[in-house]
Amino acid sequence: MNPIETKRVRRARRVMRVRKGVTGTAQRPRLCVSRSNQNLLVQLIDDVAGRTVCAISSLQKALRASAAYGGNCKAAAAIGKELGEKATALGISEVCFDRRGYRYHGRIKALAEAARAAGLKF
């Protein structure tokens, strides 16, 4: 098997292992993180209703002003702060964190800590 293919298979297994125990509801949605090399996307998802409650990306113009490059910890912290503010405006105080198989360090950790500082409970 190709080394890149095995890497994809291992990541898919991690995603399913993490996702198996995390389900979002209307009162406590799932905070889903998608990461690329240059950008970061975060969603609050209600799995029971099957809808996205809130979504924030490093591609949005408001966040581009504070962080020109979306693939670093500074941008992740700005997204986490913005997410916390939007969630509290929607009346959401608790979330389930779905890291999608990514390690909890770097951008993922910066995002989570900024969201916690903005008032979200994991």
Image (cartoon, rainbow, N blue to C red):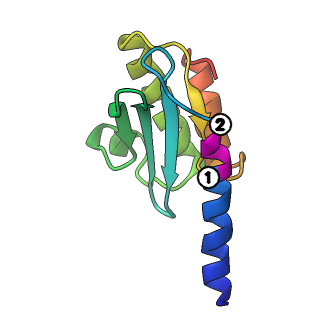
The residue that disc 2 covers is: 21
- Residue 31 point in image, percent of width and height: 51, 33
- The correct choice, above or below, for 11 with respect to 4 in the image is above
The quadrant of the picture occupied by the N terminus is bottom right
Graded by Cα atoms within 10 Å as few (under 14), some (14 to 19) or many (20 or more), the crowding at tag 2 reads few
User: In this orientation, does residue 78 appear?
Assistant: no
Front residue (pair 77, 93): 93
Residue 27 lies, in percent from the top left, at 47, 14
The residue that appears at 58% across and 28% down in the rendered structure is: 96
Q: Which residue is mark 1?
A: 16
The amino acid marked with disc number 2 is Gly
The stretch drawn in magenta includes residue 2: no
Residue drawn at (71%, 52%) of the image? 103
Residue 30 drawn at (x, y percent): 51, 31
Residue at the top extreme of this rendering: 91
Q: Amino acid at mark 1?
A: Met
Give the magenta-colored segment's residue range: 17-21
User: Does 5 sit above or below residue 119?
Assistant: below
